[in-house]
Amino acid sequence: MNPNCTVTKRANSFNDCLPPLKATILTLVLLSLAFGQQAKAGDNARHFHIPAQSLNNALMQLASEAKLELVFPADNVLGLKTSTLDGTMTVNQALNRLLQGSGITYHLIDARTVTLERMPASLIKTGNTQTQQEPQSNSGEGQVMPKVTVEADADNPYDDPTWQTDPYNRDYVLPKATAGTKTNTPIMETPLNVQVISKQVLRDQQVIRLRQALKNVSGVTAGTAIGGSDRSSGITLRGFDSETFFRNGFRLQSGSANREFANVESVEVLKGPAAILYGLVEPGGMVNVTTKQPQATPYYAINQQFGSFDLYRTTADATGPLTKDNSLLYRMNFSYENSGSFQDFVYADDVFLAPIIRWNISPQTQVTLEMEYQHQNRGYSIGFVPFKNGKPIVPISTSYAEPNATDANTYFVGLNWSHQFNDDWSFKHQFTVNKTDGTYPSAYYPNSVDRNKVLRSNLLDFVGYSDTYATNLDLIGHFETLGLKHTLLMGGDYYRTDGRFRQEVGEDTAVVPSIDVFNPVHTGSPLKVREFSVGRENIADQYGLYLQDQIELPYQLFVMGGFRYQYIEQRGTFNLDFEGESISTVNDPQRGDAVTPRVGVLWQPQSWLSLYGNYVESFGQAGSGSIYPDRKQPPPTSAEQWEVGIKGEWFGGRLRASAAYYDLTKTNIVSPDPNPNHRCGGEFSPGDPSDCVVVTGAVRSRGPEIDITGEILPGWNVIANYAYTDIRIAETNADNVTNDNGLAVGDRFFGVPRHTANFWTTYEPQGGYLKGFQVGGGVNLQDSQTIQPDSAGKTGTIPGFVTVGLMAGYSFEVGKTKVSAQLNVDNLLDKRYYTAAIPADVTNSTVERALFVNFGAPRTFMGSINVEF
């Protein structure tokens, strides 16, 4: 920020320098809703309601409401914030309240012009004593308060109510993230590639699925899980699949990508191995969802969304104190969704609740209890597309499966507390439990094509459970040695995952009717009479100890180093109940341990420029599935990466850009076995072909990535990113023990596009007759990708795609209430595309090929009405 930059704000003019962070909510719908009562103004008084926020934004709002012109050096208010201003008062009283404790005084040049400046250093007193002086204005008004320093607690990001988590904060750029270091280090001082998607981005794009948010980060592709549903959220990071996600640093297992977004504050993406702090994480990176936390200032919001395919979604958010001294705070988030789909038999009927209670025992000690409950009742399908003459045979909506309703519940409980021993040392402890259960009735699913008939398999009735128990301890300290500043993190964690399911096998399960490939007529899935049942249970215990030191050297040089010791034990059982007898088989436990290091260096020659490099190793558990014919479990994985990059910030941190180049190699990559004749379920449960997997010895991914996020001009926000992912086979399994997939060294690995790019921008006029309106749009591009070889060794590609999105909105205030309307259009040109595909066998047919696919959604509309007060 140029210290000589001067900000002028008039109610009917544009900002020139430091803009207000205003709400950007959309659509051209006029509303007449009134919440609260407008106070009557006195002779020179009026009612002000200015939420707690940055001082710059609060002053801009005051100037707009009071029809004032404010003139002040921009750096005078940079980094300062205010508490909530709510009440009937004069403009002078409002200015005094906003400037209290800032070390800034004001001068009234005339009735409508005010200048702000820092008071002379000789008049500033430290401590708790406030100093007033006689007016320094032509009108005889003015007040000066002591200078204070506003500084967030870097060690307790979830306990400190900073501006970053303020519900009214509209920034695209957030200065800090916890995912990379667990110490809430500023991103510009972190020698890692960390990207944060703020809540304002989620609002502008009306994000309700994780895959929608992740397109805002380079090197991440979503919708890679073959599930056929437009809700599928499998993702890849730097070319490698990820089935693990994090919630406030707590690791959740497979399926968590479909979590509800009603209580999401932001999404953090750490690229590259993160094993040193989090243990078993895919080497491409990790996704950490941060949730909304209780606030001391009351805030309430109701949002109603309505969209294509009969989508209706209602969310509510409420937070505030439960006691007068703010020692007990709460937050409650709720959502309900009922929606259909562009695919036959796919629907959703979901309920979500997320209450949180925080007890501020003292300024040094806090305890937080948070819970989540999510019920999902959904129709499910498998995307299956036969091709003839290079084109799909049937419309995108057609399903070759039969109707199937699933019912699942997720329960989450987290208890975490922290204590600040002194200014330098703090302690955090977290205990969490995540339990899921699901019921999946018997149904028919497509398998292959023979003689122009789609042969189908019967997915038998089964009930599945997945439980995760975890605890972790962190001790964080700040100290100096020989003039070097240290931020030390010492900690340990324990995770226990218990996954189990039971299938009910009925009579005549092998007799499954086929369906015509050109004219599918659905037969329905008959109920099966229970004949016998099979069950499996897999338990994993994971122990970790880690140490990390962040050292600040002279000349703005930052060094980060550390290591992790990881121990893993996995064991499983197989159970069979048949004619009143029970047979159990216990697999031999698998054990492994490793020490993995991480080192990074960052040089910040200017406050707006950082150059960094890092080297990381990781160690992971074996992939799921069995290898044909011995049904052995795949071997454990390992990875190593080096990366170099550059970061920059401009306009007081409102615009950030980063560029990086990485080289990452992972061993023992698991993928589905393409041979439909391979069955890995056992003697009594032959299983589905998806039970079998093949293993690739090593895969190398490398390439450049660019990310740009922030505000270019007042009211103009931009997101732009690009990645080139060169991912190839680095090593095969020559001994054939692990049943290689047949690709040769140097071949491009399947399922990963080379080029991906995304651009998104919004603009909101800052004054005049168009104030309150907002428009925006974006383009998302993904290159073609190769397909895994089929059982005959034949491969292919699926084409890339470009989609276009638009948005528009309008917001206004009614008393203390802010009302917003918004409309988003995705895939404006109605492009038909697939985000992932694997081959299916085709024999004796006029059909050229068939693919299991994950569909991209056609043109969709999403409208919303939002009320905040």
Image (cartoon, grey):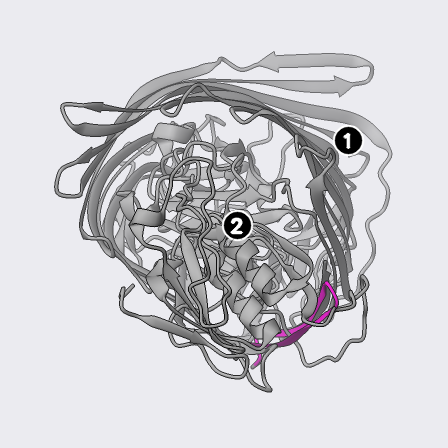
In this view of the protein, can residue 799 be seen by the observer?
no
Residue 791 is left or right of residue 508, and the answer is left
Q: Can you tell which quarter of the image residue 229 is in? A: bottom right
Instruction: Verify whether residue 826 appears in magenta.
Output: yes
Q: Residue furthest bottom?
A: 769
Span highlighted in magenta in the image: 804-828
Mark 1 and mark 2: Cα distance apart in space: 41 Å
- Residue 660 x, y percent position in the rendering: 25, 54
Q: Earlier in the sequence, mark 1 or mark 2?
A: 2
Callout 1: SS: strand
Magenta segment's dominant SS is strand
Residue pictured at 49% horizontal, 55% vertical: 99
Residue 3 is left or right of residue 497, and the answer is left
Looking at the rendering, in which quadrant would you find the N terminus? bottom left
- Residue 461 x, y percent position in the rendering: 76, 37
For the residues carrying marks 1 and 2, which lies nearer the camera in this image?
A: 2
**Which label was assigned to residue 805?**
none
**Which label was assigned to residue 266?**
2
Q: Of 546 and 683, which appears nearest the observer?
A: 546
Residue pictured at 34% horizontal, 52% vertical: 749
Q: Of 132 and 204, which appears nearest the observer?
A: 132
Q: Can you tell which quarter of the image residue 281 is in? A: top left
Callout 2: SS: strand
Q: Of 258 and 388, which appears nearest the observer?
A: 258
Within-10-Å neighbours for mark 2: few <14, some 14–19, many 20+: many
Q: Which residue is mark 1?
A: 504
Residue pictured at 62% horizontal, 69% vertical: 25
Amino acid type for the residue under numbered disc 1: Glu
Amino acid type for the residue under numbered disc 2: Ser
- Residue 392 x, y percent position in the rendering: 58, 73
Looking at the rendering, in which quadrant would you find the C terminus? bottom right
